[in-house]
Image (cartoon, grey):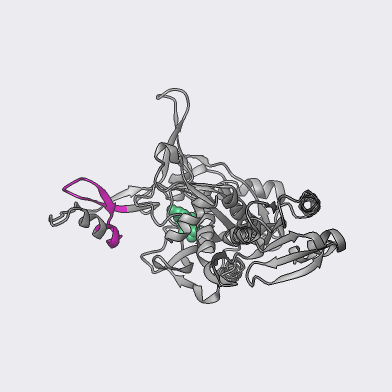
Amino acid sequence: MEKIVSLCKRRGFVYPSSEIYGGLSGIYDYGPLGVELRHNIKQYFWDKFIAEREDVYGMGAAILMPASVWDASGHTSEAGLVDPLVECKICNERVRADQSEAIKDHEAKHKGERVEWSEPKIFNLLVESKLGASEQTATKVYLRGEITQGVHVNFKNVLDSMHPKMPFGIGQIGKAFRNEITPRDFLFRQREFEQMELQFYIKPDEEEGKKWFEYWKQFAWNWYLGLGFKKENLRFRQHDNNERAHYAKDAWDIEYNTPFAGWKEAWGMHHRADWDLRRHSEFSNEDLSYFDEETKDRYIPWDIECSGGVDRAVLFVLLEAYDEDELGGEKRVVLRLAKHLAPYKAAIFPLLKNKPELVKKAREVYAMLKKEIPNIEFDDNGNIGKRYRRQDEIGTPYCVTIDFDTLEDGTVTLRDRDSGEQDRVTIQDLISKIKA
Ligand code: GAP
């Protein structure tokens, strides 16, 4: 984990937030390569869960939502988005009562002293704000604690504007905020993070519920594997009765076997039944039922939810891809990223920086490739060996070297990141090779 944190900062993936002002804990900024990796993960979600499907619509709801939304969804209640906290009677610091590790860490700070704790108290994780010019008239709002509610409150709008037939889904990607007491493990538990979600609405029926829950569990599993994980590093785990969120009838996680803390949640599957639409109907007095033209039934649909964290996917993808090996007698760090996730798809080098004819040709090849594959880098710093090491460390699948033979016969050296093997290929073949 320490190696990943250091690589992320050094190579422009992730920076501590507002670092020059001391930063905020549990919040991170993404650098030039990090945004590309995030973008590729989100694009892959959007393609598979939304764009390629006939039965799913995309949407983008606002981050700020009235407090009433969260009363209806149950997130402001004692069963909602809450953590139990205990207070240290020596220094008054509060720690999660359900995290024995956090309690032990805290007790270790008071070496030798006997630490007494208060009774656990419930703490709500929603991040509150106010909109409006004066204290008297300002409206209390919350930064959304999950992106889900933005979809449910627009259920009727999507019905009225798109006229979908059941079953159908609404997918969304966006930021969520939780005032986590002990943000930890780099991107794993943050206070500002991004989620990718699908709410899939079905007929309220036990058999339908089981069928679609199983369908989306498998779909999500295959999607997660497609991020480049080895099967043995992922597993499903069902939530116990006392662990399930207040809205869930059934819940399963896809977990990743992390090197820092063993199996950890990467993705959540929730059978939310009619919890959200029923509650929003009751609290808003709007009819959020669906009229089924075929069966002439009117009902509040059930919701099967897929929910994944973008930042956790970034962290787990980096942990899975990180490798150290030896190539040609030299040690190297290599990120074995799936090609569709790599920030740069290829890097173009002139063999020698001080030979104008090589630089000119390399620039031409670069410009030609960049039109077809925008994420291409031009690199002429240092010697070829250094350039390879640099590209390996950021996961660039191919390096293309323009040399004197290129000027004669139009061929270049194409080097593969994982094997280090080099092929001689024509400039015309480069696009298809890099895209393959
Ligand atoms: N709408 C359902 C929902 O929000 P969740 O299990 O609380 O369910 C879903 O969150 C996913 O969001 C998790 O699997 C995780 O990937 C991500 N996530 C949740 N809390 C997070 C945090 N504090 N930091 C980073 N990612 C988080």
Residue occupying the far right of the picture: 409
Examine the rendered structure and indicate whether residue 23 appears above or below residue 317: above
Query: For the point 53% across and 71% down, which residue is it?
Result: 325
Look at the image and tell me whether residue 269 can be seen.
Answer: no
Q: Quadrant of residue 264?
A: bottom left
The answer to if 87 sits in the magenta stretch is yes
Residue 14 rendering spot, x and y as whole percentages = 51, 50
Q: Is residue 420 left or right of residue 330?
A: right
Nearer the observer, 416 or 411: 411
Query: For the point 38% across and 55% down, which residue is it?
Result: 184
Q: Is residue 79 left or right of residue 285?
A: left
Residue occupying the far front of the picture: 354
Nearer the observer, 425 or 109: 425
Examine the rendered structure and indicate whether residue 347 appears above or below residue 237: above
Q: Quadrant of the N terminus?
A: bottom left
Residue 294 rendering spot, x and y as whole percentages = 71, 62
Residue 288 rendering spot, x and y as whole percentages = 58, 50
The answer to if 100 sits in the magenta stretch is yes
Give, as a single range, the part of the protein colored magenta. Answer: 84-103
Nearer the observer, 346 or 94: 346
Q: Quadrant of the C terminus?
A: bottom right
How many numbered discs?
A: 0
Q: Is residue 279 left or right of residue 369?
A: left
Query: For the point 50% across and 56% down, which residue is it?
Result: 7
Look at the image and tell me whether residue 344 can be seen.
Answer: yes
Residue 376 rendering spot, x and y as whole percentages = 71, 54
Examine the rendered structure and indicate whether residue 209 appears above or below residue 146: below
Query: For the point 56% across and 44% down, which residue is it?
Result: 286
